[in-house]
């Protein structure tokens, strides 16, 4: 049971729902409340998952169920979500994770990720996945219902030594979570400054990637300024906004101060354990597949 407002920290009351989708949000929320193995998911969760699934109720049920199960079955990633924990701090001090200030004309948020310390020994892959998910949960809270997200992964400074530290179990969890349960509309994933060993990277992850996600990937040896234009970017790339390091420091501080308790509390958002000899705890499976990933 959570004690704080989720998924939007500063919006304890339900967000306004477009009139044409209000009935579906009510339907999904009533279904949530009927599931004895779900914790206290809110009406805002119903809204968020429905929006991510393009307002399809069955898809949203499946996504929310998968979200709950992954959170319950992957405690190394979704439990003990203390932003001040040693592993998370090591990740945040070796990377830059930033939400860029300006959205695209379509209303898409741009998220930028890169290494700030290129020493492979500074990367613990499980802690990196954990930190990435915490950052994204907090950003969803900041943004509210966002029309879509464009992700930029910058491979500058990535070495084969980093690839050697990738662990298959958390990678598999991460890929399943992003594709089947993450409650956002993912529009595009740019891999910039692509490393020469990108084929080795893809050999590792391609078996875990569904065709919908594969269609969102775009690789380039160029920097983000050649894809997005400088108007959306920090001064590092000739844009008008603060340097990446400055934005990262500010957003990291926000996580450590405003979001520390909220993130720890969010660990309760997972499927409850099954009760022995009881059929009342089963979750009615929805019938359709999750459609949260969208290709324009």
Image (cartoon, rainbow, N blue to C red):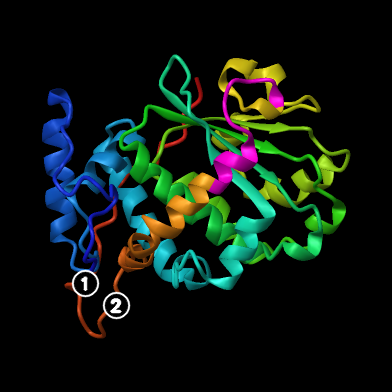
Q: For the residue labelled by badge 1, is the local secondary structure a helix, a strand or a loop?
A: loop
Q: How many marks?
A: 2
Horizontal and vertical percent for residue 129?
A: 58, 58
Q: Earlier in the sequence, mark 1 or mark 2?
A: 2
Q: Confirm whether the magenta stretch covers residue 244.
A: yes
Decide if residue 157 is in sight here. Answer: yes
Residue drawn at the location 28% of the way across and 47% of the way down? 8
Left or right: 133 in relation to 66: right
Asked whether 73 or 43 is in front, the reply is 43
Q: Quadrant of the N terminus?
A: bottom left
Horizontal and vertical percent for residue 281?
A: 21, 72
Left or right: 178 in relation to 49: right
Using the image, tell me which numbered label, if any, was put on residue 221.
none
Decide if residue 181 is in sight here. Answer: no
Horizontal and vertical percent for residue 54?
A: 33, 30
Whether pointer 1 and pointer 2 mark residues with C-beta atoms closer than 8 Å, the reply is yes
Q: Confirm whether the magenta stretch covers residue 69.
A: no
Q: For the residue labelled by badge 2, is the local secondary structure a helix, a strand or a loop?
A: loop
Density class for disc 2 (Cα within 10 Å; few <14, some 14-19, many ≥20) is: few
Density class for disc 1 (Cα within 10 Å; few <14, some 14-19, many ≥20) is: some
Relative vertical location of residue 135 with respect to residue 173 in this rendering, above or below: above
Residue drawn at the location 72% of the way across and 62% of the way down? 123
The span shown in magenta is 237-249
Horizontal and vertical percent for residue 119?
A: 81, 58
Using the image, tell me which numbered label, if any, was put on residue 274.
2
Asked whether 65 or 1 is in front, the reply is 1
Left or right: 76 in relation to 65: right
Based on the displayed image, in which of its 4 quarters is residue 73 positioned? bottom left
Work out how far the residue at label 1 is from the one at label 2, CA to CA, in angstroms: 6 Å
Badge 1 is on which residue?
281
Asked whether 255 or 28 is in front, the reply is 255
Relative vertical location of residue 193 with respect to residue 171 in this rendering, above or below: above
């Amino acid at each position: 049971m959570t004690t704080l407002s989720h998924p939007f920290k500063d919006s304890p009351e339900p967000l306004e729902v477009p009139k044409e989708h209000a009935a579906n949000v009510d339907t999904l929320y009533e279904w949530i409340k009927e599931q004895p193995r779900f914790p206290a998911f809110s009406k805002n969760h119903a809204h968020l998952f429905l929006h991510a699934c393009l307002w399809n109720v069955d898809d949203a049920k499946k996504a929310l169920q998968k979200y709950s199960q992954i959170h319950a079955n992957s405690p190394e990633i979704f439990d003990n979500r203390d932003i001040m924990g040693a592993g998370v701090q090591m990740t945040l001090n070796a990377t830059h994770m930033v939400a860029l200030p300006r959205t695209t004309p379509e209303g898409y948020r741009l998220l930028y990720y890169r290494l700030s310390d290129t020493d492979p020994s500074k990367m613990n892959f499980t802690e990196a996945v954990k930190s990435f998910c915490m950052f994204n949960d907090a950003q969803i809270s900041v943004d509210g219902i966002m029309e879509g997200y464009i992700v930029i992964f910058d491979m500058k400074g990535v070495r084969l030594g980093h690839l050697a530290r990738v662990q298959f179990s958390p990678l598999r969890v991460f890929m399943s979570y992003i594709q089947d349960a993450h409650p956002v509309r993912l529009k595009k994933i740019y891999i910039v400054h692509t490393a020469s060993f990108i084929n080795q990277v893809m050999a590792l992850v391609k078996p875990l990637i569904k065709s919908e996600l594969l269609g969102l990937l775009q690789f380039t040896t160029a920097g983000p300024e050649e894809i997005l234009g400088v108007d959306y970017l920090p001064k590092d790339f000739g844009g008008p906004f603060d340097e990446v390091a400055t934005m990262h420091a500010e957003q990291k501080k926000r996580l450590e101060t405003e979001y520390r308790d909220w993130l720890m509390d969010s660990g309760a958002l997972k499927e409850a354990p099954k009760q022995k000899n009881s059929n009342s705890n089963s979750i009615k499976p929805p019938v359709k597949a999750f459609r949260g990933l969208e290709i324009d």
